[in-house]
Image (cartoon, rainbow, N blue to C red):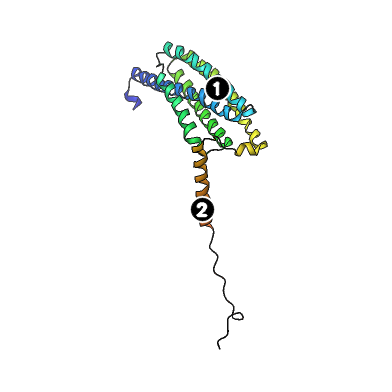
Amino acid sequence: MNQDRTPEEQADDTHAWLANLARELFQTEQSAVRHPRLEAERLGDVPPARRLRAIAEHAESALAELPGLAERHRLPVSPTGRVVGTAFSVARDQLADLFLSLERSYRGTLLGLRHGVDLMILFEQVARHDGAVALADWSATWLDRRQALLSEAEQALSWFAEHPARALEAATHRPLARAFRATVAGIEHLADRLRQPRRPPPSVSRASAPRAE
């Protein structure tokens, strides 16, 4: 319990927690560089894609500044986190997006970006408790910019409502993806048919029944 720990031990706990959050931050920012750009390439030169490219540029700028900030505050510079972030983006591009439409894939990207914002809100607060004021101030500036960019990306969802054909278009057109979606569609169609109530066989009225000789 906290009351059983010395102030020095509690400070060590806070710094260790901040270090773990820093590793996660490297990972999420690497994902924020890579996956929005993948998504933007699929969409082409349309408003949602432009919003995602702006977020990727912001994440790239943050990743350029983070190593120096981390070193000044005795935090790990996490190349592993960046590798993991790239791996997650590749895995999603290769597997998770097999059955997604462009619109659903876009919303999935926004969900990941919101996770990054939540992480930074916590990172800023823990940095202040750790006495890393410059790092906390940098985090607050990051939050102001990223939240504004994310809000613009959310507003760009209206583009999909105006272009339903593109919204429903498959996120990827690889042969494996087409085969997977066709299989899923077939299973869903079969399930729909099985859920339909069976009609009772038509009854034979007495008037139409054959008379016995």
**Image height check: is 169 above or below 10?**
below
Q: Name the residue under label 1.
A: 56
Question: Measuring 62% from the left and 25% from the top, which residue is drawn there?
Answer: 50
Q: Which quarter of the image is occupied by the C terminus?
A: bottom right
Q: Nearer the viewer, residue 9 or 135?
A: 135
Q: What residue type is labelled 2?
A: Leu
Q: Of label 1 and label 2, which has the lower sequence position?
A: 1
Disc 1 + disc 2, Cβ < 8 Å:
no
Q: Which of 141 and 93 is in front in this view?
A: 93
Label total for image: 2
x and y percentages locating residue 162 in the rendered image: 67, 36
Element at label 1: helix
Q: Which amino acid does label 1 sit on?
A: Ala
Q: Name the residue under label 2.
A: 190
**Image height check: is 103 above or below 128?**
below
x and y percentages locating residue 73 in the rendered image: 42, 13
Q: In which quarter of the image is residue 20?
A: top left
x and y percentages locating residue 101 in the rendered image: 56, 38
Element at label 2: helix
